[in-house]
Image (cartoon, rainbow, N blue to C red):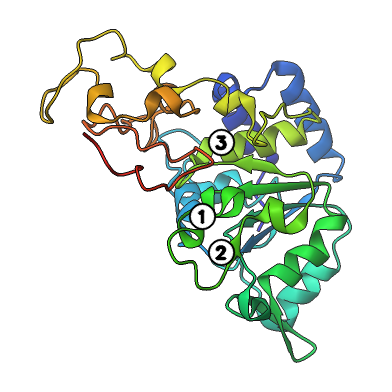
Amino acid sequence: MKVSRRDFLRYCGLSATALGLTKTDLFAIDSLLASSNAPAVLWIQGSSCCGDSISLLNRIAATVPKTVDELLLGPIDLIFHPNLMGPSGDEAVAAVRSLKNYILVIEGGVPTAYNGMACTVWTENDVDVTFGDAIRSLAPGASQIICVGQCACFGGIPASGGNPTKIVSVPSYLAMPTINIAGCPPHPDWMIGTIAQLLAGKTVPLDKYGRPTEFFGRTVHSRCPLRETEGVETYGVRNRCLKELGCRGPETYCNCPDMKWNNGVSWCVEAGGPCIGCTSPTFPSQTSFHHS
């Protein structure tokens, strides 16, 4: 699953500012990768729609590395991902259990009803292993634990409504420090940038919700190019502030206006829709999709 570290560094160099990296950080990453001491990555999925993985896979660009396989499946050494890996069954589980140096990436919430059996991740010694048991056994040995997406970070959509399987967030289930890459789904560069900073040996500054301040340090509204324009009271009016229509930008922390989506093509407000606050700890709430 490896490709050259040069491609990874080339990407980091092109996106250094967006990813929160300096030239010193790039040198540190290069030294780590050259020493073969870079940690492996285990990506475990629980109760979610897999949208966070899809967001990562949607990282496509015109410059090398053009796709996520050129970017992540080599230098970072992705050992386990249920949608992307080649090995399966006992071989895949054995690869997970043999690791001594790894970053644990967790996608999805944790079902706690029915002894967690609403979500199993693999079979080990003829026993179905629940998502909860898997992350509980792997978390203590991880150098870092990264939650990706609302479901893992805060419970998200699976934990909303009736919640029949009693899904909880990963931080509340593990009761351990985690780095929370919020969003429904998160931007691919939020995930890539966080991992790159860890490879550079940097301490990732976090807000009170465990989100990296590099990407979640300011509100959407404070960055929005429409914030000084006159507000509108109806949809279909281009290039005007949508605050009066219930835009959650003033209370939502992330850098969507700067990074944009679909590799810099656009973002929610630019496309004519209000921010729904999908990186907020309370998303989704009864008012998330209600606009005046």
Look at the numbered disc 2 and give the secondary structure of its residue. Answer: loop
Look at the numbered disc 3 and give the secondary structure of its residue. Answer: helix
Residue at label 3?
190
Q: CA distance from mark 3 to mark 2?
A: 20 Å
Q: Is residue 127 above or below residue 181?
A: below
Image quadrant in which you'd find residue 81: bottom right
Label 3 Cα neighbours within 10 Å, binned few <14 / some 14-19 / many ≥20 = many
Between 133 and 198, the one nearer to me in the picture: 133
**The disc labelled 2 sits on which kind of residue?**
Leu
User: Residue 213 placed where, x, y %?
Assistant: 63, 25
Q: Is residue 156 above or below residue 125?
A: above
Image quadrant in which you'd find residue 247: top left
Image quadrant in which you'd find residue 88: bottom right
Marks 1 and 2: which is nearer the front? 1
User: Residue 47 placed where, x, y %?
Assistant: 54, 66
| Residue that appears at 30% across and 44% down | 289
| Residue that appears at 28% across and 32% down | 274
| Residue that appears at 58% across and 49% down | 154
**The disc labelled 3 sits on which kind of residue?**
Trp
**The disc labelled 1 sits on which kind of residue?**
Ser
Disc 1 or 2, which lies upstream in sequence?
1
| Residue that appears at 77% across and 30% down | 200
Residue at label 1?
53
Residue 43 visible in the snapshot: yes
Whether residue 106 sits left or right of residue 31 in the image: it is: left
- The image quadrant where one finds the N terminus is bottom right
Disc 3 or 2, which lies upstream in sequence?
2
Label 2 Cα neighbours within 10 Å, binned few <14 / some 14-19 / many ≥20 = some
Disc 1 or 3, which lies upstream in sequence?
1
Between 135 and 18, the one nearer to me in the picture: 135
